Image: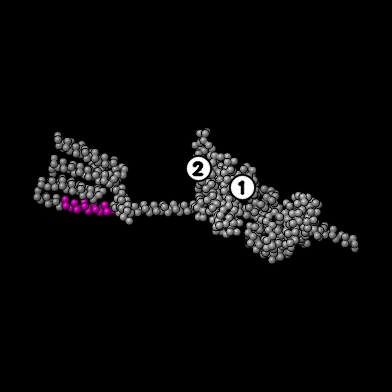
Amino acid sequence: MAKLSASMTSKTASAVQEIYRPIIRGYFAVFAAYYLLLLPTNFMYYQGLDLWSVVGIASLTSAVAVAGFFRLRTKVSIELLERLLVVLNFLVVMNVVVTLNLMFAPEKLVYFVILVMLFALASVSTRQSVLSIVFSCLAFLTFVPRIGAGDQATYGFLTFGAIMASVSITYYLRKAITYIATAKLDAEDQLEEARVVGESLRHKSLSDSLTGLPNRRAFFEALRKSKHEVTRHEKESRDDPRAPVQNLWLILVDLDGFKAVNDVHGHLVGDLLLKEVSNRLSAHCGETAHVSRMGGDEFNIILKSSGDETVIKGWCDELLEELAKSYVIEGRYVRISGSMGCKMMDLTQGARSQINEADYALMAAKKQGKNRSVIFTAAHAKQADERYKVEQALRFASLPDEIELLYQPQVDLRQNRIVRAEALARWSSPIIGDVEPSKFIKVAEESGLITQITLTVVEQAFRTLSLWAAPVPIAINLSCHDLISDPSIDQIIDMAREFKIDPTLVEFEVTETAMMIDLDKATTNLKRLSEMGFSIALDDFGTGYSNFSYLRRLPIEKLKVDRSLMENSGDPMTEKVLFSLAGMARTLGVECLLEGIESEVDLLVAKRVGADAVQGFLFGQPMSVGELSKVLENEAREKASPATVTQ
């Protein structure tokens, strides 16, 4: 406490001194100007030795005042300031003493009173003030014998009053200035505290609370700063051909398998895993790159490098190796990997579009099998441009007017007849023309627009069924977004009631990968549809998880084996795989349908492996409802004709 008090006293004294310094500097300036201006007038009143005495003391006083004025431009110690004031005050008093000794006049004794007041006003310490006042009073007393007894009393009271006033001025003025200094210090301390708090809050606002890494906001600040630095380096290196070219790389990192860790081990383990991942990212990036956590399991890296694409890819692959090593979290071994999308920044373009391009490269890395890095190229740019056009056209599309439904027959091999037709969406955009289903469905799923397409397809299919005189059961595809969205399922159920649809005429097809987004929610919504009487088919079977345990949980009535398994139907191994899948369907007690039947060989294989139904070009291309009706009518006539002949 004593040290703290001493520190505060020292700080206050220093602050008081700084407040006094411009005042005292002005004090020196006034006396310097006064005596310099007074010098010429001395030649009018004095001669000989008297002149040299007056001019000498006045010149010396001016010199000291000028020297003090310039010395006080910068901060000086309190001791030096006291000495300068004492010397100047002494010389000022001596000027009055010399003048009175040469030309005495009682009324001029008032100069000493004035000086006492001035010394009181211009003092930096009580010690210095008292010393100057005492010296002035002593000088005054030397002239008292020269005045009459009556005047002595008058001047005595005047001098005493001046002394009392000067002491009071010295005390209260210093006290007031001390208050001002203390208030100034308090204000500065509060400002410093506010600055520290503000800096702390700013740091928190720029940091991720879980990992301590810079957050999304900090990333964009760092990106702007890095672009400026690289631009400046580029300008400076134009005049130096030996200077290496520095490029700015944006690298997006997304963890593979992180959701599974959360689902299996819980969010606490997931959070600890994110901290470990952050440590590895920071260790690899070091001082060469800026890494930020953007949210969830997504991280962004800003890398300045003079290396080419090969160097950057090598740097990324080394980081991926680090991320893929085992983690020990709460005594459990956890393994994940990462995927990366890289983009060399164009400093003349905006950041947002280039972040999207890096994200496109990241998506490409995911699709290529994950645990890899992909650098955005011209080919990606072309694909991204096409995707952007499709997405924009979808966003502004009038889907009920632009979506058309075609139907592809599904044939029961036991009955040898069409028992159902799959509704397939075809989109003709007035902006970009006809778009392949594989393209616009994929873009719609990635951009969150698939539900609008699904509801349009469901509404058109339900309207067709309600107007169809002799309807055939139809199959409609549901996406992962539809499966986990209660509002979407609610709208489908409401439309079925609105169009008075017989649920037995509708089958909803879902894929295994769509189920895995949120198996519990998907299962719940499928059960809702199943309980209303709709049948459920598992599409693309054989290419996903094919896990028997979760298949038993689902209210499915049909397994649709993916068409990719029929691409080499003549291969004996193909037949064995298909036989095992058909056997799984029989074990589950559900129907097995094979897609991609395009030839008689395909059909023969389907029959040999025990498929219940088939679908493919062999039985018809996707067709309009009118064309399908004619096919059904022809099929009915062909089956009825033998009976007619018999009659």
The answer to if 612 sits in the magenta stretch is no
- Please give the residue where the numbered disc 1 appears in the rendered image: 372
* Residue 97 placement (x, y as % from top left): 16, 43
Please name whichever residue, 10 or 61, is drawn nearer the observer in this view of the structure: 10
Q: Which residues are magenta?
A: 158-176
Query: Quick check: can you spot residue 500?
Result: no
Q: Amino acid at mark 1?
A: Arg
Q: Quadrant of the C terminus?
A: bottom right
In the picture, measured across the screen, residue 495 lies left or right of residue 321, that is right
Q: Secondary structure at mark 1?
A: loop
* Residue 298 placement (x, y as % from top left): 56, 52
Residue 101 position by quadrant = top left
Q: Secondary structure at mark 2?
A: helix
Q: Residue at x 55, y 44 (%)?
A: 249
Query: Quick check: can you spot residue 155?
Result: yes
The answer to if 161 sits in the magenta stretch is yes
Above or below: residue 592 compared with residue 143 = below
Residue at mark 1 to residue at mark 2: CA–CA distance? 30 Å
